[in-house]
Amino acid sequence: MKTTFTFLATAILMSAAAFAQPGQSRNDGYGNNRDVVVNNTRGGYDRGTYYFTAREKDIQISAINRDYYRKIESVRDRRFMSRTKKDHAIYSFEMQRNAEVRNVRARFNDRRNNFHQNGNRNNGRGRKGNW
């Protein structure tokens, strides 16, 4: 009798615990399925604008430099790779890094970036626009 009761109680507790876990299908606004919507429409049409600050640009460039520095150092530390292969791998990593940095700078300087119109009104001249 005790073993039957213990087995039944254990089965009920395990099934209750299994059904108490939240699933991935929750879409009530409080789960993991949150979407961020930005309305960038003016005059009824979408211009494809965005807001990319100078700080974000600097953070992305430093992250790119840090990642490629690690990659280049790992190539330099390889003992059983010939010097020409090392030079070729380092050169290709440097070209990839330069291309990624160029893309970040182009995104910052793009005309669709609203940082230049809204966030940097004084162009670095202080509060009142004076030097």
Image (tube, rainbow, N blue to C red):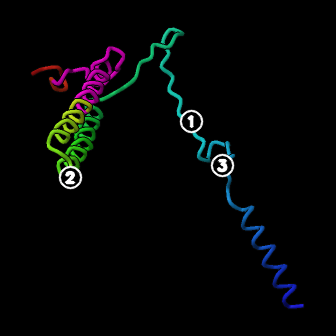
- Magenta stretch, main secondary structure, is helix
**Percent position of residue 105, x then y:** 26, 25
- Pick the residue in front: 97 or 79: 79
Q: What residue type is labelled 3?
A: Gln
Horizontal side of residue 6 vs 58, given as left or right: right
State yes or no: discs 1 and 2 in contact (Cβ < 8 Å).
no
Residue depicted at x 76% and y 73%? 13
Q: Which of marks 3 and 2 is nearer the N terminus?
A: 3
Q: Distance between the residues labelled 3 and 1?
A: 15 Å
Q: Indicate which disc residue 48 carries.
A: none
Q: Indicate which disc residue 24 carries.
A: 3
Disc 2 designates what residue?
80
The range drawn in magenta is 97-124
Q: Which of marks 1 and 2 is in front?
A: 2
Q: Is mark 3 on a helix, strand or loop?
A: loop
106 magenta-colored:
yes
From the viewer's perspective, is residue 129 above or below residue 96?
Answer: above
Q: Indicate which disc residue 35 carries.
A: 1
Q: Which of marks 1 and 2 is nearer the N terminus?
A: 1
**Percent position of residue 54, x then y:** 25, 30
